[in-house]
């Protein structure tokens, strides 16, 4: 429908046939006042509804995130078995260390081991050394068992000819078992044997 049809007949005819500019301007002003504004109340209502819907959607998303709660608790609950596993490994390592320490013999000084000596066999001076009048000391490393017997011997220093004679004598020695924490343990010590030509 043409905007002119909205005016009364007398004004519409006056506007159509008027030769005066002022009347034409008035007619245009009247026409504009009758027409609805672009994007009027209906458009504003649609915009308001859209914004309200968007706000409600954002609020619902925010509420769902808050209700879900932070994932810190579940993460920590999964990390606890790892800490327990670490504690178990530490306990195993300590147990292994104690077991290894129990296998190693206790190192005793020669003076201490001499006080535990209960039976001693004197070495025989070797005939080979008697021809030359050789004399000297032999140092042995001895491993004393839990029962006090000699379990192992090693020559550390001295003439080889004296070393064999010292071995034959010292392997017959007997010691009082060395007790540690109420239990007899193996002990490692040094033994010095002196050789002199018979007079």
Image: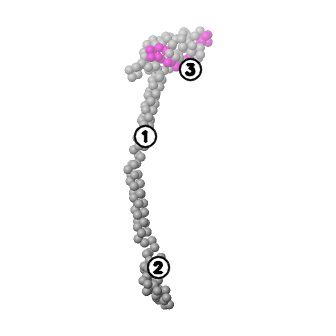
The segment highlighted magenta reads 128-150
| Residue 111 visible from this viewpoint | no
Whether the magenta-drawn stretch holds residue 144 is answered as yes
| CA distance for labels 3 and 2 | 131 Å
Q: Earlier in the sequence, mark 2 or mark 1?
A: 2
Q: Earlier in the sequence, mark 3 or mark 2?
A: 2
Q: Nearer the viewer, residue 175 or 60?
A: 60
Residue lying farthest to the bottom in this orientation: 20
- Residue at 54%, 10% (x, y): give it: 124
Q: Is residue 130 left or right of residue 34?
A: right
| Numbered disc 2: secondary structure | helix
Task: Check whether the beta carbons of the residues at disc 2 and disc 1 lie within 8 A of each other.
Answer: no
Indicate the position of residue 56 as horizontal and vertical percent values.
39, 58
Q: Is residue 105 left or right of residue 182?
A: right
- Residue at 43%, 75% (x, y): give it: 36
Q: Report the residue marked by disc 1.
A: 78
How many other residues sit within 10 Å of disc 3, few (<14), some (14-19) or many (≥20)?
few
| Numbered disc 1: secondary structure | helix
Whether the magenta-drawn stretch holds residue 108 is answered as no
Vertical position of residue 103 compared to residue 16: above or below? above
Q: Which mark is residue 19?
A: none
How many other residues sit within 10 Å of disc 1, few (<14), some (14-19) or many (≥20)?
few
Q: The C terminus is located in which quarter?
A: top right
Q: Report the residue marked by disc 2.
A: 3
Indicate the position of residue 35 as horizontal and vertical percent values.
44, 77
| Numbered disc 3: secondary structure | strand
Vertical position of residue 65 compared to residue 76: above or below? below
In which quarter of the view is residue 60 placed? bottom left
| CA distance for labels 2 and 1 | 76 Å
In which quarter of the view is residue 5 placed? bottom left
Q: Which mark is residue 157?
A: 3
Q: Nearer the viewer, residue 120 or 78?
A: 78
């Amino acid at each position: 429908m043409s905007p002119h049809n909205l005016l009364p007949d007398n004004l519409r005819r006056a506007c159509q046939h008027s030769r005066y500019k002022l009347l034409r301007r008035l007619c245009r002003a009247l026409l504009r006042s009758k027409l609805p504004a672009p994007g009027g109340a209906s458009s504003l209502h649609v915009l308001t509804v859209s914004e309200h819907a968007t706000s409600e959607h954002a609020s619902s998303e925010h509420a769902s995130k808050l209700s879900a709660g932070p994932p810190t608790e579940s993460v920590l609950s999964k990390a606890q078995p790892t800490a327990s596993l670490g504690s178990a490994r530490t306990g195993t390592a300590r147990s292994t260390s104690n077991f290894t320490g129990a296998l190693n013999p206790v190192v005793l000084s020669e003076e201490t081991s001499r006080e535990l000596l209960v039976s001693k066999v004197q070495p025989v001076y070797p005939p080979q050394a008697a021809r030359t009048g050789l004399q000297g000391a032999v140092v042995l490393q001895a491993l004393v068992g839990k029962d006090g017997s000699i379990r192992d011997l090693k020559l550390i220093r001295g003439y080889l000819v004296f070393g064999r004679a010292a071995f034959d004598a010292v392997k017959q020695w007997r010691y009082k078992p060395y007790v540690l924490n109420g239990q007899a343990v193996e002990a490692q010590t040094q033994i010095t044997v002196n050789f002199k030509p018979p007079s």
